[in-house]
Image (cartoon, rainbow, N blue to C red):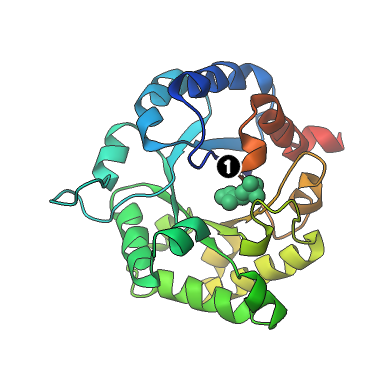
């Protein structure tokens, strides 16, 4: 059984004191939930402090991006080694906002994915179609291209590869208040799993696939209850600690007992 994972993507929100306040109360807010992995992907600047606050908790930290090189003359960039050194466990790669606003290409995403594995970070690889592509019926084609190019030439042991997290984030659903339909997202997640078959049955079965795009406490169960969806990547609803904790609680099996 794959463990449920709920990931906060804070994007470019919060000050350090707000981040500290959130992390100071999250452990209490989700006390007793031990079957859902909680991950917070915070701005780089806050990670060092948050690593101290989460040290004795089961909450993991993630970055929202990184460069692929270990070090070098790359002004303004953060390397995988710097993240690893702080005890960061996850890194979001290929978020649609990076593709859209910062020109991140499939080539760069491929290098970042390889670097995440090389330096021992768990990648959360984002894929998803935009509105025009969806309306044109190109969803699967787009996802296949994004996934295949990200994985292209990746020489990673199966044991490591299966730790990867994929996120299906339809661009039109992000920040729009209109999430995908749970059934449709499940079909896309199943399609993503079928694409992973070329990396082996075990990888296809074990990789976690999240849904992201306008997830909130009212709709999360529609996704986390689906067979192929293992959790959520959450933007807006991850900013308030009580709302984020509610998502984790709903995703927990407590809900069904
Ligand atoms: P929202 O939850 O705000 O739609 O953002 C989703 C997202 O982009 C998470 O990475």
Could you tell me how many numbered marks the image carries?
Answer: 1
Residue 146 percent coordinates (x, y): 49, 72
* Rendered image quadrant of residue 39: top right
Please tell me whether mark 1 sits on a helix, a strand or a loop. Answer: strand
Residue lying at the far left of the rendered structure: 73
The residue under the point 51% across, 60% down is: 96
Tell me if residue 88 comes above or below residue 163 in the rendering.
above
**Within 8 Å of ligand 1, the CB of disc 1?**
yes
Residue placed furthest toward the front: 101
Q: Is residue 86 visible?
A: yes
Q: Is residue 94 left or right of residue 241?
A: left
Alpha-carbon neighbours of circle 1 within 10 Å: few (<14), some, or many (≥20)?
Answer: many
Q: Quadrant of residue 84?
A: top left
| Residue nearest the observer in this picture, 237 or 85 | 237
Q: Quadrant of the C terminus?
A: top right
Looking at the picture, tell me which residue is in the foreground, 113 or 33: 113
Residue 221: where, in percent of width, then height?
80, 46
Judge whether residue 232 can be spotted in this image: no
Q: Is residue 178 left or right of residue 62?
A: right
Spot occupied by residue 152 in the image (x, y as percentages of width and height): 38, 75
Whether residue 50 is situated above or below residue 121 in the rendered picture: above
For the point 47% across and 18% down, which residue is it? 17
Q: Is residue 200 left or right of residue 88?
A: right
- The residue that label 1 is drawn on is 7
Relative vertical location of residue 172 with respect to residue 17 in this rendering, above or below: below
Q: Residue at x 42, y 37 (%)?
A: 43
């Amino acid at each position: 059984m794959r463990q449920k994972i709920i990931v906060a993507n804070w994007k470019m929100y919060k000050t350090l004191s707000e981040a500290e306040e959130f992390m100071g109360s999250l452990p209490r807010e989700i006390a007793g939930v031990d079957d859902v992995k909680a991950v917070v992907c915070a701005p780089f600047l806050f990670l060092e402090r948050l690593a101290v606050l989460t040290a004795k908790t089961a909450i993991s930290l993630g970055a929202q991006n990184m460069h692929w090189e270990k070090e070098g003359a790359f002004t303004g960039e953060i390397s995988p080694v710097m993240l690893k050194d702080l005890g960061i466990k996850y890194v979001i790669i290929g978020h649609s906002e990076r593709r859209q606003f910062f020109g991140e290409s499939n080539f760069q995403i491929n290098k970042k994915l390889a670097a995440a594995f090389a330096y021992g970070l768990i990648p959360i690889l984002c894929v998803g179609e935009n509105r025009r592509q969806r309306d044109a019926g190109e969803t699967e084609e787009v996802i296949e291209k994004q996934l295949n190019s990200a994985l292209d030439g990746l020489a990673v042991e199966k044991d490591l590869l299966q730790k990867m997290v994929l996120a299906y984030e339809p661009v039109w659903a992000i920040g729009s208040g209109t999430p995908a339909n749970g059934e449709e997202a499940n079909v896309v997640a199943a399609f993503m799993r079928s694409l992973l078959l070329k990396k082996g049955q075990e990888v296809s079965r074990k990789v976690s696939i999240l849904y992201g795009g306008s997830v909130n406490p009212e709709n999360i169960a529609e996704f986390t209850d689906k067979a192929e969806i293992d959790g959520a990547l959450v933007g807006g609803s991850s900013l308030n600690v009580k709302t984020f904790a509610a998502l984790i609680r709903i995703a927990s099996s407590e809900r069904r007992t």
